Image (cartoon, rainbow, N blue to C red):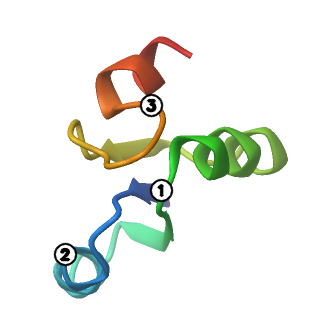
């Protein structure tokens, strides 16, 4: 089973992605955070995440491409 983390600051986009991903029986869970700091904290606390879907144009202190380097 696949655990997914969405890193996205648009709640409407998150709702759509969660709905689309929940249709796939191989996906066990879909969690979402809105900022790079929250993403790092979540990933440190949940090492069972298999896939991260990252918004490259996050409107915060760090964009998605920089986050991938972290």
Quadrant of image for the C terminus: top right
Above/below status of 5 relative to 18: above
The residue lying toward the viewer, choosing from 9 and 39, is 9
Alpha carbon of mark 1 to alpha carbon of mark 2: how far?
13 Å
For disc 1, the marked residue is 5
Q: Pointer 2: residues within 10 angstroms few (<14), some, or many (20+)? A: few
Nearer to us of marks 3 and 1 is 3
Q: Pointer 1: residues within 10 angstroms few (<14), some, or many (20+)? A: many
Nearer to us of marks 2 and 3 is 3
| Res 21 quadrant in image | bottom left
* Badge 1 vs badge 2, beta-carbon distance below 8 Å: no
Where is residue 15 drawn, in percent x and y? Answer: 27, 86
Alpha carbon of mark 3 to alpha carbon of mark 1: how far?
17 Å
For disc 3, the marked residue is 62
For disc 2, the marked residue is 13
Where is residue 69 drawn, in percent x and y? Answer: 46, 11
Quick one: label 1 or label 2, which is nearer the N terminus?
1
Q: Which residue is painted at 53% across and 41% down in the image? A: 36
Nearer to us of marks 1 and 2 is 2
Q: Which residue is painted at 35% across and 32% down in the image? A: 63
Quick one: label 3 or label 1, which is nearer the N terminus?
1
Above/below status of 45 relative to 34: above
Q: In this view, does 62 lie to the left or right of 70?
A: left
């Amino acid at each position: 089973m696949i655990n997914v983390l969405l890193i996205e600051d648009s709640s409407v986009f998150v709702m759509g992605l969660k709905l689309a991903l929940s249709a796939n029986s191989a996906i066990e869970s879909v969690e979402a955070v809105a900022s790079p700091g929250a993403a790092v904290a979540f990933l440190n606390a949940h090492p069972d995440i298999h896939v991260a879907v990252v918004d490259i144009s996050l409107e915060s202190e760090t964009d998605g491409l920089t986050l991938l380097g972290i």
